[in-house]
Image: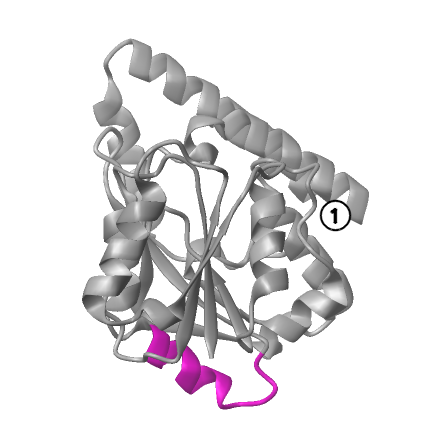
Amino acid sequence: MISIITPTFNSGSTIARTVQSIIAQDYKEFEHIIVDNASTDDTVDKVKALYKTSGLSGNLKIISEKDNGISDAFNKGIKASKGHYIAILNSDDTYFDNSVFERAIKEFKDDKILIVYGDVLFTDSLYGTNRRAPRRCEASGAILFNHPAMFIRKSVYDTVGPYLNSYHIAMDTELFYRLHKNYMDLEILTSYISEIPLAVMNAGGASWNQELQGIEETKDAMIYHGFWNFTAKKIYFARVTRTKIKKYLTMLKLNSIVKAWRRIKWEN
């Protein structure tokens, strides 16, 4: 069984499409765990109504209480989960089509596979929509996985531990470094699905709005885990510079330059 964890807080405007992309999956052996940070809007009511209409209320589990940030919400969901495989899908993201769960389960039939992952389709009306594949390079250069497009055996969390509450944006990146330290042959323990993007990630989330903070948290994680080398420093300064230039170009209403650069980056 797959356990999908979705943290929510006043997500009434976006949660329906997230839920619908899960309900529509051909593979029905799943539980959807909503970890709601005591929303004051209709988030929870919308989720319950969608599951009731679909006849899948038994697949839904709701935890509604104050949390200490996104990492805490992730951890609550993992602790409450009963599935062998964990996926995290935020409340403004969706799965690409109804075959995603079946594709992941097929890969997990190989007992040595710990993580199944793929591309995301990143939709951004401001800077352009791109299909984003994981960057294939050493750990100091980039994170191997797109978090919304990742399925992970629950047993892996028993080995590497939970998400850290001290990270508010780059908690997935910090976890990635722990994965690398615990599994020396990480790449051969994973399976990459390339036929379709697995998830659609929409601009406007925490990592998009707080990009510089995410870069700084990534730097802290690399230093702590021993990945802060010359390559890491070079990429860090390049990311900070690009982010600042992007903000400046946006102020000048020159978004087309950023769009062109992103198109070149993600098509190569």
Total count of labels: 1
Q: In this view, does 224 lie above or below 47?
A: above
Decide which of 249, 13 is in the foreground and name it: 13
In the shown orientation, is residue 190 left or right of residue 15? right
| SS under mark 1 | loop
* Chief secondary structure of the magenta portion: helix
Residue 84 on the magenta span:
no
- Residue interval drawn in magenta: 101-113
Q: Where is residue 41 in the image (x, y as percent from the top left)?
A: 33, 33
Question: Residue 137 falls in which quadrant of the image?
Answer: bottom right
Residue occupying image coordinates x 32% and y 38%: 262
Q: Where is residue 36 in the image (x, y as percent from the top left)?
A: 47, 44
**Residue at the spot of label 1:** 227
Image x and y of residue 223, in percent? 77, 40
* Residue in view at x 65 percent, y 38 percent: 167
Question: In which image quadrant can residue 213 be found?
Answer: top right
Q: Position of residue 210 (x, y in %)?
A: 49, 27
Write the residue at 68% across / 65% down: 157
Residue 86 left/right relative to 32: right
Q: What residue type is labelled 1?
A: Phe
